[in-house]
Image: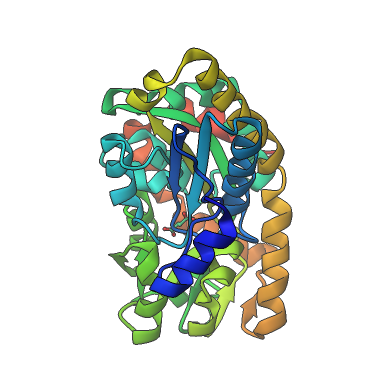
């Protein structure tokens, strides 16, 4: 079915159309569900580019539909839907894999990476390759790492030093590491799905949050906050997954072409994630005066405040893995 027709039908019945809804009878459908925006977002743009390539290069055999903005599922439900083969792809942030593995929470460690380049170099490394296997026992096939960028922290008051966060409640992803990070500040946490964050900030259910510039801008979080601190204190990235059952169901040559398209798109688009976040940071800077830029001394204070989190988790995650990740930093 052609996209324009789907959009027109969707408008008539009040539902939104997926990007690239052009599946014909006989084509293997790859449905991907994302919680984030599609356009102007690192993950959304990568998924759209992959769908465009699948739908062009594998036309007649495979078709890929991308649903954004939690239109189909929140992340926990998306992972269950992948295992049921109700959808065939998802790319949740590492924090969402807690029900299946402890190891990926490594990425939530504050100041693990100096920046997005170091994080990308690690995820492209041999050391990170073993992380692709940790989801196999649960029935997932890890396709690869997708990048977003560094997290910034925001609240109903400007946060210049760690003590400024004391007593506030922050929305967190479902990660024990992130909860420990806020506990180290004397702050409280509330786990909420991404789709619930904006309303929770507006209603005051939570007073703060942390996320990448692309998420802060596309979901308007900055509009409900009195300060966004350019902290760059942790990395937000994704594991793109399908199920082993789905992969095994494909003809070998189709599976190889699907995996090749994934690989090439990932390689190309992970490099754009930095630029996309920079552009979204500019968008937020243009629209609000409430950005807090940290001095080197202030950033060092945040780093020191978060350091105890490492001792809490290094046995569970593995000291060698943490050291391997940190080896990509300059200092
Ligand atoms: C995402 O970037 O996929 C959402 C992360 C979050 O839940 O904050």
Measuring from the top left, give residue 267's x and y in whole percent: 67, 34
Number of numbered discs overlaid on the protein picture: 0
Q: Quadrant of the C terminus?
A: top right
Of the pair 42 and 24, the residue shown nearer to us: 24
Residue 72 or 7: which is nearer the viewer?
Answer: 7
Q: Identify which residue is drawn at 39% across, 42% down.
A: 105
Q: Position of residue 46 (x, y in %)?
A: 61, 46
Using the rendered image of the protein, determine whether residue 111 is visible from the camera's viewpoint: yes
**Residue drawn at the location 65% of the way across and 37% of the way down:** 56
Q: Closest to the observer: 284 or 17?
A: 17
Tell me residue 66's x, y (percent). Answer: 50, 50
> Would you identify the image quadrant in which residue 136 lies?
top left
Q: Is residue 313 left or right of residue 305?
A: left
Q: Residue at x 38, y 47 (%)?
A: 95
Q: Position of residue 24 (x, y in %)?
A: 49, 40
Question: Would you say 323 lies left or right of 104 here?
Answer: right
């Amino acid at each position: 079915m052609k996209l324009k027709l789907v959009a027109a039908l969707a408008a008539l019945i009040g539902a939104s159309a997926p990007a690239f809804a052009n599946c014909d009878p006989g084509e293997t459908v790859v449905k991907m569900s994302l919680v984030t925006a599609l356009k102007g977002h690192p993950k959304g743009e990568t998924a759209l580019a992959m769908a465009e390539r699948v739908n062009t290069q594998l036309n007649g055999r495979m078709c890929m539909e991308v649903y954004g903005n939690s239109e189909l599922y929140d992340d926990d439900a998306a992972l269950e839907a992948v295992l049921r083969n109700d959808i065939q792809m998802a790319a949740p942030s590492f924090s969402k894999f807690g029900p299946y593995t402890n190891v990926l929470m490594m990425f939530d460690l504050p100041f693990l990476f100096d920046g997005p380049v170091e994080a990308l170099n690690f995820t492209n490394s041999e050391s990170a390759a073993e992380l692709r296997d940790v989801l196999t026992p649960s029935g997932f096939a890890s396709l690869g790492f997708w990048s977003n960028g560094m997290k910034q922290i925001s609240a109903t008051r400007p946060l210049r030093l760690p003590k400024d966060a004391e007593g506030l409640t922050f929305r967190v992803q479902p990660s024990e590491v992130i909860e420990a990070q806020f506990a180290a500040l004397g702050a409280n946490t509330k786990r909420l799905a991404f789709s619930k964050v904006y309303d929770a900030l507006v209603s005051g259910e939570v007073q703060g949050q942390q996320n990448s510039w692309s998420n802060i801008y596309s979901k308007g979080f900055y509009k409900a906050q009195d300060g966004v601190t350019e902290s760059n204190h942790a990395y937000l990235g994704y594991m793109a997954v399908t199920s082993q059952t789905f992969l095994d169901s494909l003809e070998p040559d189709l599976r190889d072409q699907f995996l090749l398209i994934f690989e090439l798109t990932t390689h190309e688009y992970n490099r754009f994630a930095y630029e996309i976040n920079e552009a979204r940071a500019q968008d937020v800077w243009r629209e609000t005066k409430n950005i807090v830029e940290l001095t080197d001394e202030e950033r060092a204070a945040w780093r020191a405040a978060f350091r105890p989190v490492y001792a809490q988790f290094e046995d569970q995650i593995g000291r060698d893995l943490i050291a391997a990740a940190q080896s990509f930093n300059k200092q």
